[in-house]
Image (spheres, helix red, strand yellow):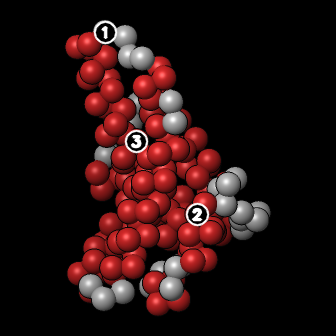
């Protein structure tokens, strides 16, 4: 992805925070988890492989016109964070009961989760074109 403007970055980060905060009280996250969230946010904003920008460009104009690209980027980042948090909790619980976790079992999990999150976010945005309640849900979770 080309260099992001400060406004784009700020919008995406704020929307991501707003959406994630609806599920996980972000202000109460331990420092380690907050650092992980910030790292995830930075990595997905950077979009080194161009997956997000390609997916956005391939959306029908009717879907892209529903919201700013930066807002949708933030929604996608929050969705990835929530999925990653859920899986991390499951792994943690399994580690407590089953002993050591086999590292190779979880190799590539972040990439898979980010890809799944992007696909899910795109599906929701496409559906929002004809489903007013879905569009309203987007607006509601994105609001502070």
Across and down, in percent, residue 85 comes to: 36, 39
Image mark for residue 52? 2
> What residue is shown at x 58% (from left), y 41% (from top)?
39
In the rendered image, the quadrant that contains the N terminus is: bottom right
Q: Nearer the viewer, mark 3 or mark 1?
A: 1
Q: Is residue 86 above or below residue 91?
A: below
- Few, some or many C-alpha atoms within 10 Å of disc 2 (few <14, some 14-19, many ≥20)? many
Of the two numbered discs 2 and 3 on the same chain, state the one appearing first in sequence: 2
- How crowded pointer 1 is (Cα within 10 Å; few <14, some 14-19, many 20+) is rated as few
Q: Position of residue 23 (x, y in %)?
A: 28, 51
**Residue, far front:** 104
User: On the image, which quarter does residue 4 sit in?
Assistant: bottom right
Label 2 with label 1: CB-CB less than 8 Å:
no
Compared with 39, 125 (above or below) is below
Residue carrying label 3: 84
Residue drawn where x is 31% and y is 40% of the image:
86
To which quarter of the image does residue 29 belong? top left
Horizontal relation, residue 114 to residue 3: left or right: left
- Tell me the residue that label 1 is attached to: 99
The answer to which of 112 and 130 lies nearer the viewer is: 112
């Amino acid at each position: 992805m080309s260099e992001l403007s400060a406004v784009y970055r700020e919008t995406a980060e704020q929307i991501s925070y707003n959406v994630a905060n609806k599920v996980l009280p972000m202000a109460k996250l331990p420092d380690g988890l907050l650092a992980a969230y910030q790292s995830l946010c930075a990595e997905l904003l950077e979009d080194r492989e161009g997956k997000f920008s390609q997916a956005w460009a391939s959306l029908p104009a009717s879907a892209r016109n529903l919201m700013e690209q930066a807002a949708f980027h933030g929604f996608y980042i929050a969705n990835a964070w929530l999925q990653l948090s859920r899986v991390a909790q499951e792994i943690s619980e399994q580690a407590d009961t089953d002993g050591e976790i086999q590292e190779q079992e979880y190799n590539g999990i972040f990439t898979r989760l980010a890809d799944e999150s992007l696909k899910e976010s795109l599906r929701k945005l496409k559906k929002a074109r004809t489903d007013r309640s879905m569009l309203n849900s987007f607006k509601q979770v994105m609001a502070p």
